[in-house]
Each structure stands twice: as C-alpha cells, then as structure tokens.
Image (spheres, rainbow, N blue to C red):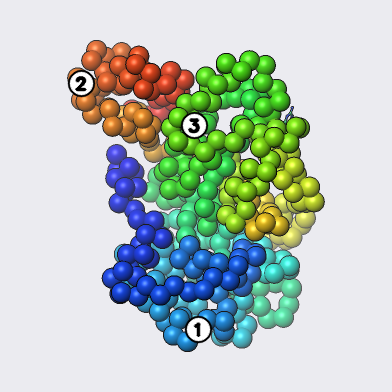
C-alpha cells in the first residue's frame, strides 16, 4: 500500500514545474530548439527535463528564471544534485553515461567516448540509492587533456528505474536514469507468449512511474487468431498502447519507429523475442554489436568489478533506446500478496468491497473480483496471471 500511496503523491516533473510556474505567475515559455541529439547541447523541452543547455544561447535572465522555477518545483524533492558542481567553467563538459562499472563509467560527449572515474566527494549517503551513477545519467565531467575524465557531478534526473539492492529493501539500485517509457517486447511464439511476465513488467512500470507500451512481435507466427485475440485484447481494453509487429514481414515497424523517436525508452523482454531484430528493422544501419566495456578491456586493470552491460543507442529520429539485463530482475520485489490486486487497475477499485476485508480473491464468497471475472469486467487471463503471481509473492 505504501508504494501505491507514494506513487499517488508523486507529482510528475512536468506537473510540478507547471505548478511552480503558475505560482510565480511566470508563464513565459522559451522557444524550443529542435532536439537532435539527447546528450548534446540541444534542449527541445526544458520542462521535460533536459538540462543540457548551452547557457550562451539562453536569453538574458532565462537561466535565473529556470533556476528559481526548478528550486520552487523541487524544494522537497530527492532529485536535487547532492553536490554543486565544483569545476571551473572552462573545463566542464556535460556527457551521457552509456555504461557503468564500479567506480568507473563510460561517458559519451558528442561523438567521443571517455572513460571516467568518479570524484571522491560524490556521496552515496542520503540518496537512498546504492549507485551514484547510472546508464542514462547526464553528468558534468572534467578532463585534464588525457584520455580519461572525472565525473564531478550528476545532473538532476527526470526519472529513474530502480530495483532493490540485494536484500536491503531500503536501498535501491538505479537500473537506468532519464527514460520516458518502457517498451515491453513479447513474442507470440518462439518463445511462447508469457502473459504473466507481461503483467510483471506492467506493474514494474507503474511502480517506476514510466509509461508502458506493449509490443507483441512475431505476429507472422499466429496460427490461431482467436487464441491470439483472447490473450492480447484485454491489454488494449485496459488502454495500453499495443503494437503488433513482425520483424519478418515489417508489420508495426513504422509505428515502433515513431514511438521510439524523440523519447528515451528502455526495452524489456526475454531473450529471443526479437528486440534486436526489431531495432534493426527500425534502423538498418544501427550497430547492435556494441560489446560491453569489460569485453573491450576499457576497464582492464581496475580490479574486480561488476559491469552493467547496458547498451544505449541513439536513433536518427532522436530516440534513445536502452537495453539492459538489469531490467530482468527489477520486478515485484517488496510487493506482498495482499497488495497485488492494487496493481491491477481493473481490480484495484473493486478489492475493497469484498465481503472479507482480507479477501484473497481466490476462494472467498461474495468476492467482487471473482464476480467481475464472471461478468467479464475483469478478463479471465488477467485474473489467471493475478493468481499465479500472487503465489510467488511473500505474505507480508
Ligand atoms: N518468425 C519471426 N522470427 C523473428 C521475428 N523477429 C525476430 N525473429 C527471430 O527470432 C530470433 C531472436 O531474435 P533477436 O532479435 O535476436 O531477439 P532478442 O534476443 O530479443 O534480441 C532470431 O532468430 C530472429 O530471426 C519475427 O517477427 N518473426
Ligand atoms: Mg538481442
Ligand atoms: Zn475478493
């Protein structure tokens, strides 16, 4: 329940800034340069959270206005940077973190990639996160002319995708930062669609305040349209954006390209469902063979480390796509059996009206959710997923 309440309380960044603007009566909006490249000096939508602004191109007073708005909007927020940048302006460069290892990261600055260590004064305390820097972070780095750099500070994040850090539930690891949406990719066959996993990803997206889009790939392998509809239709009925695709026939590819453009998207989906094939279909010249930092030996000689083998691609239409194995285990940790129905939007509002306050919605009489399944208001497959997932969750 706490998670849910927290979520309800949380204001999106945009809304907060809008509120702050209303409070200051400052409604002047800034002309938007078109964003060409996430991580370069463009900002297409400051309110959307891009901090990579070349101050020289801002009108007089604009920087101050933004700073004030920012402070007002986020005065109680945890997203403030821990330390103010302490670099002198000449050597400060902003970049995009594309890979992380313990104490080190790879930062992309324009077309260059720089191996960076982290400045010692960056503090882990009080952030509540187990890692200081995550893939997708915008950072300010300094370099002394050599081949490596130092991360001086992490710019405020517009979103984080987190998972618990090991067994310590209070400490969370940032899997990726600054993504707008999560694209859940499943395949109809090979591997067989697994609706329960779909639901797990959807819940995880909700918990992280990320918009979820569902892509069902390999629709060229549909052998039974009715069976397909029965599984897939409940999700579109719930209002999820659903893309039916085939990397083989090209169906759905244009739609996917549009969805990924101008946004930062993290991919979720089992190995083999066709994520790489879809990306190749979207942009044939995309280099999918970006080997991990560890393989390239960039981090060699740095002692033992665990590398987050995230891959980050910039599409020519402005989109950013991040694929990370970290996504596989970010699911439902911390959710108890009794909380699960609250994460099914079609069940959440009903679960309070059952005869028993502690109704599991499995066997009890006068259960509003079971009634809703009978009447079709809650779909049979979703209910089935609910009961299976419930089994796997801790009682408290
Ligand atoms: N029939 C069919 N096969 C596909 C489709 N998309 C991908 N595949 C195949 O599925 C396998 C796994 O694809 P891949 O892109 O590597 O999956 P990933 O692990 O999610 O990146 C490959 O053999 C692809 O050729 C599709 O739409 N239809
Ligand atoms: Mg792949
Ligand atoms: Zn019930």
* Residue 272 x/y as whole percent: 69, 32
Question: Front-most of 335 and 285?
Answer: 285
Mark sitting earlier along the chain (2/1):
1
For image coordinates 50% across by 77% down, the residue present is 85
* Residue 134 x/y as whole percent: 56, 57
* Secondary element at image label 3: helix
- Asked which quadrant contains residue 106, the reply is bottom right
Mark sitting earlier along the chain (2/3):
3
* Mark 1 residue crowding within 10 angstroms, few (<14) / some (14–19) / many (20+): few
* Secondary element at image label 2: loop
Question: Front-most of 145 and 195?
Answer: 195
Structural distance between the alpha carbons of marks 1 and 3: 45 Å
Give the position of the C terminus as an image quadrant.
top left
Judging by the rendered image, the residue that carries numbered circle 1 is: 59
Give the position of the N terminus as an image quadrant.
top left
* Mark 2 residue crowding within 10 angstroms, few (<14) / some (14–19) / many (20+): some
Judging by the rendered image, the residue that carries numbered circle 3 is: 236
* Secondary element at image label 1: loop
* Residue 105 x/y as whole percent: 63, 62
Q: Is mark 2 within 8 Å of ligand 3?
A: yes
Query: Which numbered circle lies on residue 356?
Result: 2
Q: Is mark 1 within 8 Å of ligand 2?
A: no
Structural distance between the alpha carbons of marks 2 and 3: 31 Å
Structural distance between the alpha carbons of marks 2 and 1: 62 Å
- Asked which quadrant contains residue 370, the reply is top left
Report whether residue 376 is seen: yes
For image coordinates 44% across by 47% down, the residue present is 208
């Amino acid at each position: 329940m706490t998670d849910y309440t927290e979520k309800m309380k949380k204001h999106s960044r945009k809304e907060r800034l809008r509120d702050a603007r209303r409070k200051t009566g400052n409604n002047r909006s800034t002309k938007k340069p078109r964003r060409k490249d996430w991580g370069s000096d463009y900002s297409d939508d400051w309110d959307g959270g891009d901090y990579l602004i070349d101050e020289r191109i801002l009108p007089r007073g604009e920087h101050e206005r933004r700073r004030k708005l920012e402070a007002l909007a986020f005065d109680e927020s945890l997203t403030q940077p821990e330390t103010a940048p302490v670099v002198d302006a000449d050597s400060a460069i902003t970049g995009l973190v594309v890979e992380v290892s313990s104490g080190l990261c790879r930062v992309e600055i324009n077309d260059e990639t720089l191996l960076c260590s982290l400045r010692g004064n960056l503090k882990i305390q009080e952030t509540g996160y187990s890692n200081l820097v995550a893939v997708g972070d915008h950072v300010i780095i300094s370099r002394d002319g050599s081949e490596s750099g130092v991360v001086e500070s992490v710019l405020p994040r517009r979103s984080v995708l987190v998972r618990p850090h090991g067994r310590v539930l209070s400490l969370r690891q940032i899997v990726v930062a600054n993504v707008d949406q999560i694209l859940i990719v499943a395949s109809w066959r090979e591997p067989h669609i697994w609706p329960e996993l779909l639901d797990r990803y959807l819940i995880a997206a909700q918990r992280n305040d990320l918009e979820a889009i569902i892509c069902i790939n390999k629709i060229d392998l549909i052998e039974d349209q009715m069976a397909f509809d029965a599984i897939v239709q409940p999700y579109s009925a719930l209002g999820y954006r659903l893309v039916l695709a085939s990397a083989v026939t090209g169906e759905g590819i244009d739609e996917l390209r549009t969805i990924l453009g101008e946004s930062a998207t993290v991919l979720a989906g089992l190995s083999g469902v066709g994520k790489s094939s879809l990306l190749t279909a979207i942009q044939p010249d995309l280099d999918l063979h970006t080997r991990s930092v560890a393989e390239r030996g960039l981090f060699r000689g740095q002692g033992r480390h665990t590398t987050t083998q995230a891959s980050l691609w910039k599409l020519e239409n402005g989109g950013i796509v991040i694929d990370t194995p970290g996504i596989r285990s970010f699911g439902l940790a911390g959710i108890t059996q009794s909380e699960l129905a609250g994460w099914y939007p079609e069940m959440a509002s009903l679960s309070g009206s059952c005869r028993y306050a502690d109704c599991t919605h499995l066997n009890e009489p006068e259960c509003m959710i079971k009634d809703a399944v009978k009447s079709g208001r809650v779909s049979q497959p979703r209910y089935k997923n609910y009961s299976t997932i419930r089994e796997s969750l801790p009682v408290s």
